[in-house]
Image (cartoon, grey):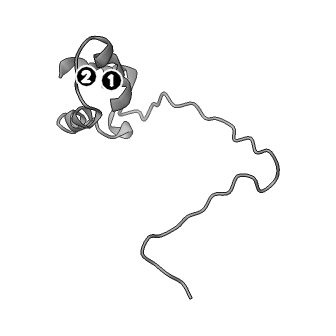
Amino acid sequence: MDLIETWRREKKWAARQIHIELTGRGHQVSIATIGRWFVRPGINRRKDLDPTGESNKRPGKIIARFAGYVVHLDAEGGRTYP
């Protein structure tokens, strides 16, 4: 548990990356279990990891093949319109 919390706080790894690392070390822990462990110390959301809001995410550029190729659609479930 301490190792998982350390990786989460210092490296800001997601449950999947921690799962891969633990599997490489010979431990079998599911991704869902690791995610549940994040909840206990309150580090399940990225904004909870660092009080300053620092992130290890890097912005990227979306490159479309042509105008209109990439379309973003917001859909609300359960509603139908005439």
Circle 1 or circle 2, nearest the eye: 1
In which image quadrant can residue 20 be found? top left
Question: Which residue sits furthest bottom?
Answer: 82
At label 1, the amino acid type is Ile
> Do the numbered discs 1 and 2 sit on residues whose CB atoms are within 8 Å?
yes
Label 1 to label 2: alpha-carbon separation: 7 Å
Residue 13 appears in the rendering: no
Lower sequence index among marks 1 and 2: 2
At label 2, the amino acid type is Ile
Q: Picture coordinates of residue 61 (x, y %)?
A: 69, 37
Residue 48 appears in the rendering: yes
User: Would you name the residue on which mark 1 appears?
Assistant: 18
In which image quadrant can residue 37 be found? top left
User: Would you name the residue on which mark 2 appears?
Assistant: 4
Q: Picture coordinates of residue 42 (x, y %)?
A: 23, 38
Which of the two residues, 65 or 38, is positioned nearer the viewer here? 65
Residue drawn at point x = 38 percent, y = 37 percent: 46
Q: Residues within 10 Å of mark 2 (few under 14, many from 20)?
A: some
Q: Picture coordinates of residue 38 (x, y %)?
A: 24, 34
- Image quadrant containing the C terminus: bottom right
Residue drawn at point x = 46 percent, y = 78 percent: 79
